[in-house]
Image: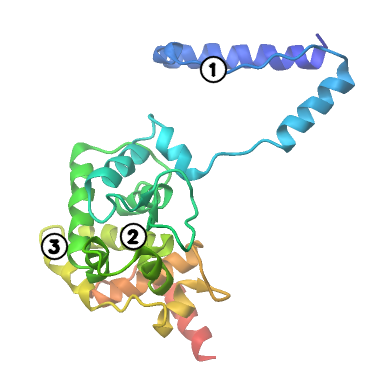
């Protein structure tokens, strides 16, 4: 075996040994290994390039579906099966939904919305209290969102909903998660009463404010700026104050809009 490849194998062995010392339970896991006949350094280098060039990374939703260690993924999977409006309307494997799909949300979008709701960022791990709070929040949002109820009651088709409303998309779901984080912090005791004001929000894409807040070049965008601007509109609708960073972005948005 060539020296460079031998070093790679030794490094991998050391990494595995270190991981097992830190978490012995990993010893029960299986790792897929593919062996190739050594036909020389150039051949090995070309195979390395080919394998990495054509490697297909699984979609975020598929990763969340099978990742049993990620507690935020576990929470999203539970809600996709038990919490309205996610029951039966969550795409579990793909991270993009076609216009004709019967699904509304992706599992990865729900996972990210929960991270925003519970203010977890990139950290994993939820307490039982946080899981319960998340479930209660989305149930309350469902009760305050007539269009979501129309979907459940088959008064509005998923394809029409996605075509005409922004809260059928990742940017709207993520913004609702961010809104919930602010609401639960500002009004921990009476947030369920305040969330009812969502019924007054005009979620239609034809609403001019979404064209400049939730969209980029005429298309819905999940960029952090668009999510924050969408959240700002929801917070103002519910009478919640903006954070300093949100206020700075809002002022820039207003200035640009008036220019």
Q: Quadrant of the N terminus?
A: top right
Residue holding disc 2: 178
In the image, is 62 to the left or to the right of 58? left
Name the quadrant of the C terminus: bottom right
Residue located at (77% from left, 27% from top): 48
Alpha-carbon span between mark 2 and mark 3: 16 Å
Dot 2 crowding, Cα within 10 Å, few <14, some 14–19, many 20+: many
Who comes first in sequence, dot 2 or dot 1?
1
User: Marks 3 and 1: which is nearer the front?
Assistant: 1
Question: Residue at image x 37%, y 39%?
Answer: 73
Q: Position of residue 151 (x, y in %)?
A: 27, 64
Element carrying mark 2: helix
* Left or right placement of residue 242 versus residue 254 in this view: left
- Considering depth in this image, is 177 or 35 the residue closer to the camera? 35
Residue marked by disc 3: 192
Query: Measured from the top left, where is residue 167 in percent x and y?
Result: 35, 67
């Amino acid at each position: 075996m060539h020296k460079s490849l031998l070093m790679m194998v030794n490094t991998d062995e050391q990494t595995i040994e270190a991981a097992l010392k830190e978490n012995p339970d990993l010893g029960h896991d299986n790792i897929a290994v593919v062996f190739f006949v050594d036909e020389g350094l150039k051949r090995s280098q070309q195979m390395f390039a080919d394998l990495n060039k054509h490697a297909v990374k699984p979609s975020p939703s598929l990763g969340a579906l099978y990742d049993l260690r990620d507690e935020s993924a576990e929470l999203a999977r539970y809600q996709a099966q038990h919490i309205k409006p996610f029951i039966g309307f969550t795409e579990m494997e793909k991270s993009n939904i076609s216009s004709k799909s019967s699904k509304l949300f992706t599992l990865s979008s729900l996972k990210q919305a929960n991270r925003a709701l519970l203010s977890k960022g990139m950290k994993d791990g939820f307490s039982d209290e946080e899981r319960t709070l998340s479930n209660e929040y989305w149930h309350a949002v469902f009760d305050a969102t007539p269009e979501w109820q129309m979907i459940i009651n088959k008064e509005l088709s998923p394809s029409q909903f996605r075509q005409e409303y922004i809260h059928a998309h990742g940017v709207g779901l993520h913004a609702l998660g961010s809104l919930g984080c602010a609401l639960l912090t500002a009004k921990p005791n009476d947030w369920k009463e305040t969330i009812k004001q969502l019924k007054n929000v005009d979620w239609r894409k034809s609403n001019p404010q979404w064209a400049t807040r939730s969209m980029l070049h005429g298309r819905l965008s999940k960029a952090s700026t668009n999510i924050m601007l969408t959240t700002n509109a929801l917070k103002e609708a519910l009478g919640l104050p903006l954070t300093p960073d949100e206020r700075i972005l809002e002022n820039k948005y207003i200035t640009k809009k008036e220019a």
